[in-house]
Image: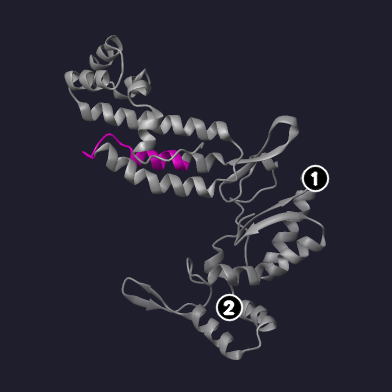
Amino acid sequence: MDLEKFFDRVNHDLLMGRLAKRIEDKRVLRLVRRYLEAGVMSQGVVMERHEGTPQGGPLSPLLANLLLDEVDQELDQRGHAFVRYADDGNVYVRSKRAGERVMALLRRLYGDLKLQINESKSAVARVWDRKFLGFSLWVGAGKTVRVRVAEKALNAMKQRVRSMTRRLGGRSLGQVIGKLRPYLLGWKAYFRLAETPQVFRELDEWIRHRLRAIQLKQWKRGRTTYRELVSRGLGSTTAARIAANTRRWWKNSGMALHIALPNRWFAERGLPSLGA
């Protein structure tokens, strides 16, 4: 379940009514009201705000929870298992028919709050086909339900890494790794709950493959490539074969280059491992 343009459509009067039930200090209520009604600058012109909360503002997620709390309470009273973060949520039921009943209930409850479900992003479907905050579920050995990175989030991560490791721009390998490092550390920390070590190992291999291709391109000439590979412990025959095709960076980087540029070599230069 996803709410359509939630932060743009929060009704101020309804929200303030919920706040008034919890907060007695009128000064705090007036401050929140001023926060909600603060104008928006658009092309140099201040526009008044009559609904919605400032998206990205530090107070907006808290206000969202206060407004949507009664929906959570209703689901809890009916015994439903559910999870919600701001305007994104999943409700887990035993059958499609039960899911359709819950979806109809949510349409009514959110409608009472003058909110609308985003039908294009919401659905009654098998849990394996849905995602939540970049995660999805899968069945592991022994029919154990486990957490994984959702396919959409995985594809977005790969696209980001591709853009950061393009073989253009004249950057040194150290500069590329320096740019990759904070992104990979943040991504790893966010998805640390994922129970898919094999996926993370394959990502590590793929990233190092791209970095090896960058290094090959930077060596440019066959003689330079041959000299560098041999000095790093690669056999002369293999080094000569790679050096003879210096412009086939991607194919060559998947050959025996891991001997000349091993995993340890990348770790020493600050490249984090997702699978470690």
Residue at the farthest right position = 78
Left/right placement of residue 82 relative to residue 206 reads right
Colouring scheme applied when the structure was drawn: one colour
User: Residue placed at 26% from the left, 26% from the top?
Assistant: 216
The span picked out in magenta is 156-171
Q: Is residue 39 above or below residue 188?
A: below
Quadrant including the N terminus: bottom right
Residue 130 belongs to magenta span: no
For this rendering, which residue is in front, 7 or 246?
A: 246
| Observer-nearest of 129 and 189 | 189
Residue 12 - label: 2
Q: Position of residue 263 (x, y in %)?
A: 40, 30
Residue 44 percent across, percent down from the top left:
31, 74
> Disc 1 versus disc 2: distance between alpha carbons?
36 Å
Residue at image point 54% right, 33% down: 199
Q: Secondary structure at mark 1?
A: loop
Residue 216 visible from this viewpoint? yes
First reached walking from the N terminus: tag 1 or tag 2: 2
| Residue type, label 2 | His
Camera-near label (1 vs 2) is: 1
In this figure, which residue is indicated by the disc labeled 1? 94
The residue located at (70%, 60%) in the rendering is: 107
